[in-house]
Amino acid sequence: MLRVHKIILAACVAFVGLQGFAHAQDAVVAKVGDLEITQSELDLAIANLDPQLQQLPDEQKKIAALSGAIDVKLLANSAQEAGLRDDAEFQRRMNFIADRELHNLYFKKNVVDAITPEEVKARYDKEVADLPKQEEVRARHILVKTEEEAKAIIADLDAGKDFIELAKEKSTDPNKSEGGDLGYFTKGRMVPEFEEAAFAMEPGTYSKTPVQTQFGFHVIKVEEKRDQPPPPFEEVEPQVRQLVMRDKYLEILEKAKAEQTVEIVDEALKKGYEEANQVQP
């Protein structure tokens, strides 16, 4: 992955949020002198509002965006009357904006719009296949203050009493009402003493000696062991789509670099650019 490309892609992805506005009906919503404000301009103004203003209700956002657009048109009208359209600085800025927008449109057409559901699902399957296997345990426990209490509970279990009922009756843990159920957990989630005991046990068994931790004395029952399942596709589809988008974007960039010459005259900038674009492990 290229460090610079992370930054570039983040900027490009921000453009995706504007893609719907290209198809907006271009009705005139306001006029400022001879200048018009169209619906598509208003939509763009809404999309580019300050993040704080983005939190406003839709109607208030429209008003805020329209107010800003009118301000722009008022000064744009004054700028045209002052002849600033022919100013060299204005032309430089317009050239930069034009290049950026061409980049964005190319990105939308060849990256965003080119991604298929099949590509996203295939990438998800690949990521899932590459995930390391990680065992997880589902366990219950009964927490008491003393070792003697824990031994008495183990004796009750040996005598055939139900673990869940004992947890509800004897445990001091807040989850006692759920029968001491801790759900599934992987290594590193519990305190070391508890974790070591739980992962060493077989499903369906309970600890034959009390397990002491900083919280007290535990009697543990392991309900099940399994490999941790991957997150459902529906939950991570947006993130996977971003991976596909990134790869397509980098592929397009590498092809463009192979076809064109990039020359950086300033040696310090050249060194920084090359370091930033080195492939990371």
Image: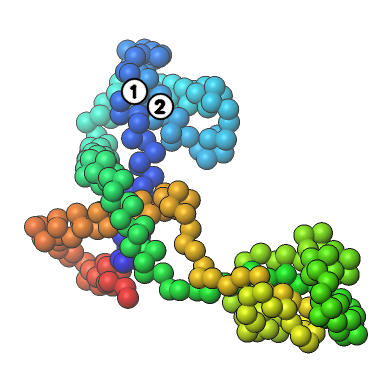
Quick check: can you spot residue 235? yes
Q: Residues within 10 Å of mark 1 (few under 14, many from 20)?
A: some
Residue depicted at 43% across the width and 52% down the height: 233
Q: Quadrant of the C terminus?
A: bottom left
Judge whether 187 appears above or below 79 on screen.
below
Q: CA distance from mark 1 to mark 2?
A: 8 Å
Q: Amino acid at mark 2?
A: Asp
Report the disc number at residue 43.
2
118 and 156: which is toward the camera: 156
Q: Cβ–Cβ below 8 Å for labels 1 and 2?
A: yes
Report the disc number at residue 111.
none
Q: Is residue 232 left or right of residue 192?
A: left
Judge whether 249 appears above or below 155 on screen.
above
| Mark closer to the observer (1, 2) | 1
In the image as oriented, which residue stretches furthest toward the left? 259
Identify the image's colour scheme: rainbow, by chain, secondary structure or one colour. Answer: rainbow
Q: Which residue is mark 1?
A: 24
73 and 181: which is toward the camera: 181
Quick check: can you spot residue 192? no
In the image as oriented, which residue stretches furthest toward the front? 160
Residue depicted at 33% across the width and 18% down the height: 25
Judge whether 205 appears above or below 50 on screen.
below
Q: Amino acid at mark 1?
A: Ala
Residue depicted at 46% across the width and 22% down the height: 66
In x, y percent, where is residue 125? 35, 59
